[in-house]
Every structure is written in C-alpha cells, then in structure tokens.
Image (cartoon, rainbow, N blue to C red):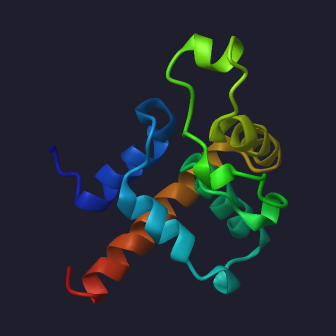
Amino acid sequence: MNGTNDAQRRVCTLGELAQRGKPPSWTVSFLMDMDESQLDDEARWALAYWRLECYQWDDLVGPKPEGFDQMEWMPKNFLQRTLFKKRFRNYYTLPKQILIGEVISREKLKGYSKWFAQLKAEQDRANGR
C-alpha cells in the first residue's frame, strides 16, 4: 500500500470513525486503557476528544449521562432521531467534541491521533504482536 505501515493505516481509521458508525475494537480498548498520568493538559483533552470520537465517555468532560452505555452509537435514519426522539451516544459526544475542537485545533487533534496510533504500534511491538 504505497509504503504505508500498519500504524499509518490505523491513523486513517481514527479519522473516519464517525462515517463508519462503529470504531475498531483495538482503538476503543487502547484509548480507554491509556495511562492518563503521563499526559500534559492538551494531550489529555485530545485523548478525551478521541475517546468521544469512539463513542466512549471520558470523565474529563463531565459526568456520564444516565444510560449512556446502553445507547446505540448513532441514528440509523432520520426517523429515529426526529420522529421517535430517541437519544443516541452522538447526541452527548458531539457537542463536547465541538467544544474541545474550539480549544485545540483540528490539525493538532489529527497529530494526537497519529501519536496515539504510534503509541499503540510501539506497545504491540513491545508485546510481540
């Protein structure tokens, strides 16, 4: 694939999560298990952004809405969202992502997604995967 390695392909996947509807399992587990104590403030907010992008709640943005873990990821069609007024995870995650995006530029957030993917690749190499 024109010289791209596995970590670079995974970075592309991070940027396309909203379009695909459900994040790959490696992303969710890696981001949720990441050691937050090693991150500075900006990196911590970027981690919160990417966790929200994976439809996982981060306590940094506030208390988790009731029933969040049982909600579907996003509406499958217009009727679910409007006519039935059903709540989805993206109803709660998207506004928080917009606020974080106003503080940290989109380019920096993309850079952090690449950094997180590199950390995942390094962790895989260290574990012999």
The answer to which of 51 and 90 lies nearer the viewer is 90
Instruction: State the quadrant of the N terminus.
Output: top left
The x and y percentages for residue 59 are: 77, 66
Q: Is residue 85 left or right of residue 99?
A: left
The answer to which of 40 and 25 lies nearer the viewer is 25
Q: Is residue 72 left or right of residue 25?
A: right
Q: How many marks?
A: 0
Instruction: State the quadrant of the C terminus.
Output: bottom left
The x and y percentages for residue 25 are: 38, 58
Which of the 4 image quadrants contains residue 121? Answer: bottom left
Q: Is residue 99 left or right of residue 19?
A: right
Which of the 4 image quadrants contains residue 80? Answer: top right
Question: Residue shown at 31%/61% (left/top)?
Answer: 7
The x and y percentages for residue 8 are: 33, 54
Q: Is residue 49 above or below residue 98?
A: below
Question: Residue shown at 59%/82% (left/top)?
Answer: 35
The x and y percentages for residue 34 are: 55, 77
Q: Is residue 104 left or right of residue 16?
A: right
Q: Is residue 110 above or below residue 95?
A: below
Question: Residue shown at 77%/53% (left/top)?
Answer: 66
